[in-house]
Every structure is written in C-alpha cells, then in structure tokens.
C-alpha cells in the first residue's frame, strides 16, 4: 500500500506519471513549487516504462514505446538527467526484389549506403536525388527544432524564416503539398519510396496523398529531432529515462502516489479540488495548478466534459515485442543479420504495397501482407539483458505495424489480433533465410516469447485514446489557429489547467516538450 499524500494542498498536481508529467514535475519542483504526481497504475512511467515482458527472462523491454529522437538536450541539461542515447550503426534495412536483396542505409559509412543504393538502382543518380531530399528535410528541421521549447509562432512567421530556395522548396514540399509528391519526385524505386513514406505513417492512418496532410505532420515528427532527425537507442532502455526523471523529481521534493485514479477536477478561484480514488478510498487535495498528462478522453472525463474525437485522431499501430535466442539470417545478399536488424528493418513496406494495404484497412479488411517496421535494441545496447542472456546471444526485437487502425479490431478483436501476429511472422519468414519462429526464445511452458498489442490494448492499458500513440491528431510545429499564436500550446479553456502530455500542441512521441512547456507556462521562461 502506497502512503497517502503528505499535504492537503499543492502548488501543482500532475495527473499521470508518463515522461511528460515527470518533466513538468521536475521543472516545477526545482523552481520551489510543491508538487504531487498521481498515477493510476501501480508503477511510474506510463507508456515509457520498461517491463520484464517475458517473466521467465531477465530482459527489460519498452513495452509500448520505441527509439528516441525528439527529447531535447536542453531538458536533459536543465534537469541534470543521467539519461543517454547512443547511435545505431545502421539507419535502415529495406528488402526488395522478392527479399533477395536489401537496401542498407548506414549511420556510420556513407559509402556503404551509396553502394547499396547503386546496387538497387544501377546508377548513382538515385543517391544524388535522395541526398537532395535529405537536404530538404534538414532545411526544415533546423528551422523547426529550435522553436519547440518556446511559445508558438504563427504560420506566417514560421514561413518567413524559409528564405533560401531550398528552404522555400522544403516548406512547399512538407507543409503545403501532400508528402507523396516530394517522395515521388526524388525517389523512383518503389522500395526507397516505401522507406521514406514509413515516417509519414507510423502511428497514424494516412496515405501519401491524403488531403488532410496528416502524413506530412507525422513525417515532420520523424525528421526534425535535434535538427537532424536521427533516431537513437536509449541506453538501458526507456526505464533509464523514467528512472532518471523520477530520481530528479524525488531529489527536488516531488511526491508520488500510485494506484491513484483521478475522477474529477472541481475548479476554484484560487485553487482546484482534485478528487481521486486511492486503493478503494476517495480522497481529495487542493491544487493551484493542475497538469494533465493523459489522453483527451480522460481529460474530458475529469473536467466533466464530453469527448468528441475527430477522424484523424484514430490510432493505427500494432506493437509487437519479441525475445530471440539468436538473430536469424536474412536472404539479402551481402547483408549480415547484425547490419540488417540493428537499423529500422522494413517488412513489406513497398510504396505501392502500402497504398494497397491502406485501402484494404480503410474498408475494414486486414492487409495481407502486413507492413511493419522493426529494430533490435540489444545490438546497439545489450544492457537491457542480463549478462547471462548477453553471453548466450539473446536479442530483443520491437516491431511497429502500419495500416492497423483501431477500426480493424472493433469486432473479433482476439481472433484478428492472433491473425495479424501470424501475418507478421509470415512476413519475417519471407525475409529470413531460416524459420524466424525457430529463433524465438521459449518460456517455461514452451510458448514463444512474442507479445502483441492492438490499438485497443494501448487504449486500455496506457490511456491512448483509440490506440493513438500521439494521443490525438498531430499538430504542426507552428500555430495554425490565431488564438494559439504566442501560447505554449498547453493552455486549456480552464484557468490554471494544462495539457502536460502528448495531446498538447507539439505533443506526441517521447519528447518531454509538452511537459517542459506546461512548466514554463506556469513559471515563465527562464
């Protein structure tokens, strides 16, 4: 049983202990504010927590989240976090030609990448065009990234920063026109187009020419991190981020209460009353400020409002965690298992194939083949495994499935979940030069160590509305509404109540940005 709160009144109560809530709590407490964090689960960390997913093995996987790109170094430095990330040797591996070949994009050897693309296309023209596209990505990333920890600029002000021909083309390509247009302009090979489009689809349900431009916003989140868009491995797994934040919070005096489900926030002129259920008892505390690090549906519920999702709020993701006894060999000539699995490993993600899979899923049909992206954490950072498992050659794999919207699982959930797991195993069997299932570790009952989470599972377990890993529709990095210009993007219609999570403007992904911005909204910039 966790203890009751030490006080009856706080400067700030944070609802939810995900990384954004922890970032906000740390900033506020270090500024001298009294802070209470209420967490409905019995452990801290929300969707960023690491867990011993397969109890028979000392392996700590991030059950729900992925790599790190968007967590600013400024937050790490401001809060004195010990959290670190490290580079993957391989950026991506994309099989093509019936999986007999594979495109390798290296993070450490450009000549390897160029040679691999030459083998795929027969010339260096494709590499030259690809570099032009990367330059466009960097052009907009370097303008967007420095703005995320400051009040929102207007669309007009943001656009006015794009002054060179290259920057203006980047604006047109990523902000004004559907993403498919620029991909088709700079990439001719279907596999390369698919590789690029993946960043516009992970977690959202969209196609290359979707008029909503949801795919563009998703793409931006995947390319702007730290100004270069590199996705890095969290050393020690996601729990290292959670643990470092919790340690910082505790050192600053933050109080934590787990198994505490907030039921209602009653607004008051000077302080709000936060009512919550703690281990079967209804309790309440006063809070000058309330910061909500939870999904929009939960926010609406505790504020006494009706939740109204929009079409683009629908999540579209399957999360699969696996523990392997060893890595399988791949069919692609000249590509080792270590090279292929260390990077983002693309499964059935050809451009045209994903257009087809999107169309099928839109009509309620499970796409077959099922597109997905996967990587091996332990090739870059083995520390999430015990020394014994490391010595035996065990590895972890984390897979995100695309074109798997919430709507697909509203009927026959469990049967469809099992069917999709088999589809991904079939896809891996086509890519690998041996039975993929034979490489999976087995638990004490002889069952394979593979776990699959649907959008419904994500909604139920970590409060991701409709399974949306970004909480709701992704926003642009600037204010698209006049009333948001100059705000932090965390303010709500309720005084001193803030969205300190992914549903804030510029929220989404493991970034800590909404948590920082909610704290700054209370404290003022410093």
Image (cartoon, rainbow, N blue to C red):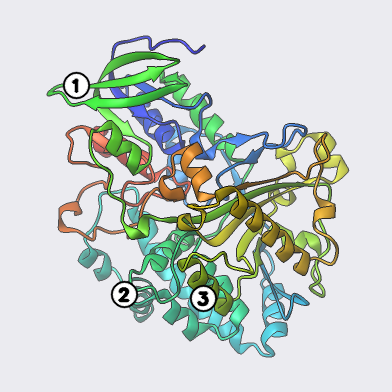
Corner quadrant of residue 28: top left
Q: Which residue is mark 1?
A: 271
Residue 409: image location, x then y, percent: 51, 53
Camera sees residue 469: no
Corner quadrant of residue 212: bottom left
* Nearer the observer, 222 or 348: 348
Q: CA distance from mark 2 to mark 1?
A: 43 Å
Q: Which mark is residue 355?
A: 3
Secondary structure type for disc 3: helix
Q: CA distance from mark 1 to mark 3?
A: 51 Å
The disc, 3 or 2, on the residue closer to the chain's N-terminal end is: 2
Residue drawn at point x = 37 percent, y = 21 percent: 36
Q: Which residue is mark 2?
A: 176
The disc, 2 or 1, on the residue closer to the chain's N-terminal end is: 2
Q: Classify residue 421 as left or right of residue 454.
A: right
Rate crowding at label 1 as few (under 14), some (14 to 19) or many (20 or more) other CA atoms within 10 Å: many
CB-based contact (under 8 Å), mark 3 and mark 2? no
Instruction: Name the front one of labels 1 and 3.
Output: 3
Residue 452: image location, x then y, percent: 63, 48
Instruction: Name the front one of labels 3 and 2.
Output: 3
Q: Quadrant of the C terminus?
A: top left
The disc, 1 or 3, on the residue closer to the chain's N-terminal end is: 1
* Nearer the observer, 426 or 60: 426
């Amino acid at each position: 049983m966790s203890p009751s709160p030490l006080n009856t009144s706080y400067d700030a109560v944070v609802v939810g202990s995900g990384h954004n809530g922890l970032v906000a709590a740390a900033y506020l407490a270090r500024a001298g504010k009294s802070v209470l964090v209420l967490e409905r689960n019995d452990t801290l960390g929300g969707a960023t927590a690491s867990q011993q997913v397969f109890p028979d093995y000392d392996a700590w996987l991030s059950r729900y989240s992925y790599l790190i790109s968007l967590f600013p170094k400024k937050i790490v430095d401001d809060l004195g976090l010990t959290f670190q990330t490290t580079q993957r040797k391989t950026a991506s591996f994309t099989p093509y030609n019936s999986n007999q070949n594979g495109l390798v994009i290296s993070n450490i050897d450009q000549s390897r990448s160029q040679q691999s693309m030459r083998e795929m296309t027969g010339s260096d023209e494709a590499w030259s065009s690809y570099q032009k596209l990367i330059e466009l990505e960097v052009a907009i990333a370097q303008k967007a990234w420095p703005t995320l920890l400051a009040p929102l600029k207007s669309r007009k002000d943001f656009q006015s920063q794009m002054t060179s021909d290259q920057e203006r083309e980047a604006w047109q390509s990523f902000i004004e026109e559907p993403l498919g247009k620029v991909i088709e302009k700079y990439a001719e090979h279907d596999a390369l187009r698919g590789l690029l489009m993946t960043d516009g689809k992970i977690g959202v349900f969209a196609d290359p020419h979707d008029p909503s431009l949801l795919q563009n916003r998703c793409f931006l989140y995947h390319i702007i991190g730290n100004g270069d868009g590199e996705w890095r491995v969290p050393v020690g797994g996601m729990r290292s981020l959670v643990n470092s934040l919790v340690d910082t919070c505790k050192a600053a005096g933050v109080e934590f209460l787990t198994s505490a489900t907030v039921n209602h926030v009653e607004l008051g002129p000077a302080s709000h009353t936060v009512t919550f259920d703690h281990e079967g008892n209804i309790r309440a505390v006063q809070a000058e400020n309330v910061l909500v690090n939870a999904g929009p549906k939960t926010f609406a519920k505790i504020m006494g409002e009706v939740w109204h999702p929009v079409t683009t709020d629908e999540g579209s993701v399957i999360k699969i965690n696996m523990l392997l006894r060893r890595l399988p060999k791949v069919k692609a000539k000249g590509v080792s298992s270590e090279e292929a699995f260390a990077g983002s490993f693309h499964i059935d993600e050809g451009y045209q194939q994903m257009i087809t899979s999107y169309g099928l899923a839109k009509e309620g049909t499970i796409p077959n083949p099922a597109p997905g992206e996967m990587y091996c954490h332990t090739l870059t950072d083995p520390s999430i495994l015990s020394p014994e498992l490391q010595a035996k050659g065990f590895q972890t794999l984390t897979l995100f499935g695309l074109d798997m919207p919430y709507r697909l699982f509203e009927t026959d959930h469990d049967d469809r979940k099992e069917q999709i797991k088999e589809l991904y195993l079939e896809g891996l069997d086509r890519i690998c030069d041996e039975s993929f299932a034979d490489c999976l570790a087995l638990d004490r009952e002889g069952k394979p160590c593979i776990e699959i989470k649907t959008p419904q599972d994500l909604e139920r377990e970590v409060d991701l509305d409709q399974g949306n890993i970004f909480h709701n529709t992704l926003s642009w990095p600037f204010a698209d509404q006049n009333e948001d210009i100059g705000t932090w993007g965390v303010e709500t219609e309720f005084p001193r109540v803030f969205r300190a999570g992914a549903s804030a403007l510029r929220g989404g992904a493991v970034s800590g940005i909404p948590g920082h911005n909610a704290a700054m909204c209370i404290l003022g910039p410093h």
